Image: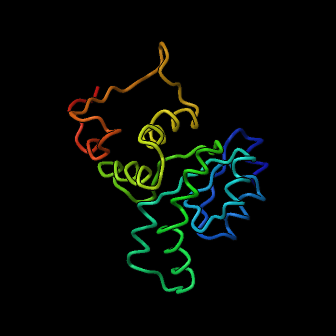
Amino acid sequence: MVAAVHAAGARVAMHCMDTASVEAALLAGVDSIEHGSNITEYQVRRMAAQGIAWCPTITLIRSFMRRGVPDHDFNERALTFYNETLHKLLPLAASLGVIILAGSDTIPPADFWQEIAVLQEYGLSPQAALDSATTVARDYFGFPGLENGAPGDVVIYDADPRDDPEALAAPSLVL
C-alpha cells in the first residue's frame, strides 16, 4: 500500500500507539508517524535514517493518560514514556534531523497553541516548536515559504510567542 501511495505521488501517515505499531510503520516505509507512543531510541534513530517525520500529538495523548486506559500494562508504559522518556527522545529526534510536526487529532484550532507549548516543555527550542506548526509544516506539505509571489499570512501578537506560547491564543492582528 505504501509503495502504491508513493507511486501516486502522495504520502502515508501512520497512527502508532505502541512500540509494535511504530515498528510496523518503519518496516512499511511510511512518511510520518503520528503519536509514536512508547517509541524507542533505536526506532527514533531509524526514523532519522529513513527520513520519517514525527507528529507526537502530546497534548492529546497526555489527556488520555490522565484518565487512564483499560489496558493497565499499556497505561503504565505510556505514563513512564510521557513523564520521562519522551523528554529525552523528542530533543534527540530533532537533533538527528527528524522533522517534528505540531499536530492533533482533537485540539480545536483556537487551542492549538497548547501543542506548541508542550513541544517546548518536552525539549524543543521555542523557535523549533513554533516552526513545527508554521514553516516546517508548510515545507513538509509542499507549500511555498516566505518567497516572492507566495501566499502568506501575517499574524501579530502583543508578546513574542517564542517567549510565551500562550500568546498564540490571542493574536492582535491577522492579515
Q: Is 37 situated left or right of 83 in this image? A: right
Residue 36: which quarter of the image? Answer: bottom right
Quarter holding the C terminus is: top left
Above or below: residue 126 compared with residue 28? above
Above or below: residue 73 compared with residue 156? below
Quarter holding the N terminus is: bottom right
Q: Is 11 situated left or right of 166 in this image? A: right
The one nearer the camera, 38 or 80, is 80
Q: How is the image coloured?
A: rainbow
Residue at 58% x, 45% y is: 94
Above or below: residue 43 compared with residue 32? below
Count of marks overlaid on the render: 0
User: Which residue extends farthest top?
Assistant: 148
Residue at 71% x, 38% y is: 9
The one nearer the camera, 89 or 50, is 89
User: Residue 95: horizontal and vertical position, in percent?
Assistant: 61, 44
User: Residue 133: horizontal and vertical position, in percent?
Assistant: 45, 41
Q: Is 168 situated left or right of 145 in this image? A: left
User: Residue 12: horizontal and vertical position, in percent?
Assistant: 66, 50
Residue at 70% x, 47% y is: 48
User: Residue 18: horizontal and vertical position, in percent?
Assistant: 62, 70
The one nearer the camera, 144 or 158, is 158
